[in-house]
Image (spheres, rainbow, N blue to C red):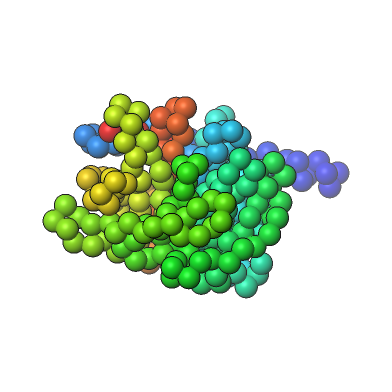
Amino acid sequence: MVILCFTTILIFINLILKSEASIYKDKYLLNQPKSKDFEIIDIYFRPYSCFTQGLLFDQSRRQLTESCGWQGDSKALFTKFDEQTSQVLLDTQVNMEKNHFGEGITILNQDKYLAMTWKDRVFYMMDRQTLKILSTEAIPNEIKEGWGATSNGTYVFITDGSEFIHFVDPSSLQVLKSLKVVSQKGTPIRNLNELEYFKDKTNGKDFIWTNIFLQDSIAKIDLETGMIIKRVNLKVLSDVQEAYIKETNPRLVGYDKFNSVLNGIAYDEIEDVFYITGKRWSFIFKVKLF
Ligand SMILES: [Ca+2]
């Protein structure tokens, strides 16, 4: 009897989530404003909480992976898409130590993920097969704090809140060089946050898309010069999230607007799409960038 009731409750919750996800998908997907820079092609509901500090699409697993911050709640989440209910569901959760604050995550090499901590001076090494934590390693001194991470097989690229992207050797974990990121007028751009490496197949050039802390736009950095060559304003994504919060939590109980910012970019090379989200957002957006 208890089991039957529990099953009924689960089905009921699933129905609510399904309808909720579908309602918001229809509402925002079909009515999105036209943009020359991007198109939202799908919206997934995220029925779990993550203070998103890192977002990664692992081609070999075809899996979206997140790293989440906050003391006592830092973790890496390995997820799966449920196309039927338009949700991203939790598959495996790997918790960091309670006193650590999680930051970006990326693929280190064929065997390992590297996940960062903010001020705790350690990288976590995780096994790509078993998803277990293998070890922690010291963050080199050139990196002031752990913020964003991405990789291309040759380097792990890391931000620390400054205007620099540090190029880290995946074997020695030492900083080989640091690239200053500047605007087209030469102004250094600080607070570079979550990152995503992107190779343009049409010309073979290397770029990194970056979040900039507290900004609603993402920026495309030329990895040769460090210059930001493009910015894409994604305020419409923040607006969807905020509209959802206002509808479902009109009194904004416990809502932390300052920390609910755009953060997290992951690229799926096969589909040529980006997954984009924000800290503790209810949605993950599948986006084409032009
Ligand atoms: Ca990323």
- In percent of width and height, residue 94 lies at 67, 54
Give the side of residue 188 with respect to residue 81, left or right. Answer: left
Residue closer to the observer: 290 or 179: 179
Q: Residue furthest right?
A: 1
Seen at 69% across and 41% down, the residue is 129
Quarter of the image that includes the C terminus: top left
Quarter of the image that includes the N terminus: top right
Residue closer to the observer: 161 or 276: 161
> How many numbered markers are drawn?
0
Residue closer to the observer: 65 or 278: 65
100 above or below 164?
Answer: below
Give the side of residue 173 with respect to residue 209, left or right. Answer: right
The answer, for residue 192, to whether it is visible in the render is no
- Give the quadrant of residue 42: top left
- Give the quadrant of residue 163: bottom left
- In percent of width and height, residue 245 lies at 42, 55
- In percent of width and height, residue 92 lies at 67, 47
